[in-house]
Amino acid sequence: GENVEQHPSTLSVQEGDSAVIKCTYSDSASNYFPWYKQELGKRPQLIIDIRSNVGEKKDQRIAVTLNKTAKHFSLHITETQPEDSAVYFCAAKGAGSYQLTFGKGTKLSVIP
Amino acid sequence: GAVVSQHPSWVICKSGTSVKIECRSLDFQATTMFWYRQFPKQSLMLMATSNEGSKATYEQGVEKDKFLINHASLTLSTLTVTSAHPEDSSFYICSALVWDIQYFGAGTRLSVL
C-alpha cells in the first residue's frame, strides 16, 4: 500500500518568515495530494490540494509543489503569522481508491 | 466546503458500556464516509470505510465486532464502540467524501473510565 513520509516533525519560524514542509510518497499511481491544517482538539481542515496533472498550485500565502518523478510534494507558507501555528498533515490518494494515506504531521510554531 | 457534523464532541463512559457516535453530512449526500482514530500528537489512522447501504470495510487490525459502523442513509453514518474499555479512549473523527475530497467532522473525544 501507499506510504507517506513527512518532514520535519516540528518546525519553528519567526513571524514573517517562510515555512516549508515536505512529503514523499511511495505509490507512483497516486494522483491527489491534499494538505490539512489541524489546530489542537479541532477538525482537520483542507487548506490546499494538488492533482497529479499539475506541478504547482498557489492560494494567497500558501503554495504546493509536486514532483511526480521524485514522488514528493511540498507545502510552502510565506509571510507566516501566529495563526498559522498548528499541525499540518500531508496525504496521498492512490488511483482507483478514495482512501487517503496521511503523513505523521508537522507541528508548526510561528513565533511572534 | 462541505459541512460535516459529528456528535457528541465529548463523551465519558464507564468500562463495559457502549457509545454511539454520529457523523452527518449537512449540505450534501455522502455515499462514502470514513472513520479515523487519532492518538495524542499522532496522525489520523483510518479505521474503516463506511458505504451507504452496504457493510463497512475495516482496516487490518480493527475489530469489526468492537467498532460497529452503520451507514443507513446518505447523510448519516454511526460508529458504535461496544463494551468500551480504557484502551478505547481516543479521539475519533469521521469524514465525508465529496468527489475525491474528504471533509472532516469536529471529532469525538471518548474517555472510558
Image (cartoon, rainbow, N blue to C red):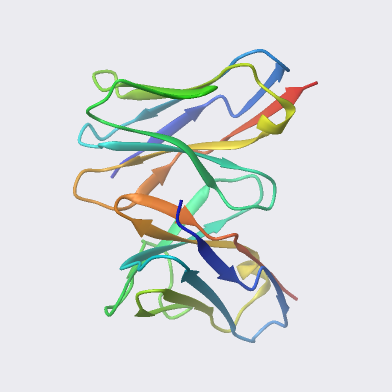
Residue A31, relative to residue B24: is it above or below? Answer: above
What residue lies at 48% left-to-right and 30% top-to-bottom?
A: A6
Residue A68 is situated, as x and y percent measured from the top left of the image, at: 26, 23
Q: Quadrant of residue B60?
A: bottom left
On screen, residue A13 versus residue B104, left or right, reads right
State the residue in front, A3 or B32. B32
Total numbered labels placed on residues in the image: 0
What residue lies at 25% left-to-right and 35% top-to-bottom?
A: A27
Residue B7, relative to residue A4: is it above or below? Answer: below
State the residue in front, B63 or B106. B106
Q: Of all residues shown, which one is farthest toward the bottom? A: B17
Residue B15 is situated, as x and y percent measured from the top left of the image, at: 69, 82
Q: Of all residues shown, which one is farthest toward the top? A: A17
Q: Quadrant of residue B51?
A: bottom left
- Name the quarter where the N terminus of chain A is drawn: top left
Residue B67 is situated, as x and y percent measured from the top left of the image, at: 47, 75
Residue B101, relative to residue A21: is it above or below? Answer: below
What residue lies at 43% left-to-right and 76% top-to-bottom?
A: B76
On screen, residue A23 versus residue A66, left or right, reads right
Residue B102, relative to residue A17: is it above or below? Answer: below
Residue A75 is situated, as x and y percent measured from the top left of the image, at: 48, 24
On screen, residue B70 versus residue A53, left or right, reads right
What residue lies at 25% left-to-right and 30% top-to-bottom?
A: A52
- Name the quarter where the C terminus of chain A is drawn: top right
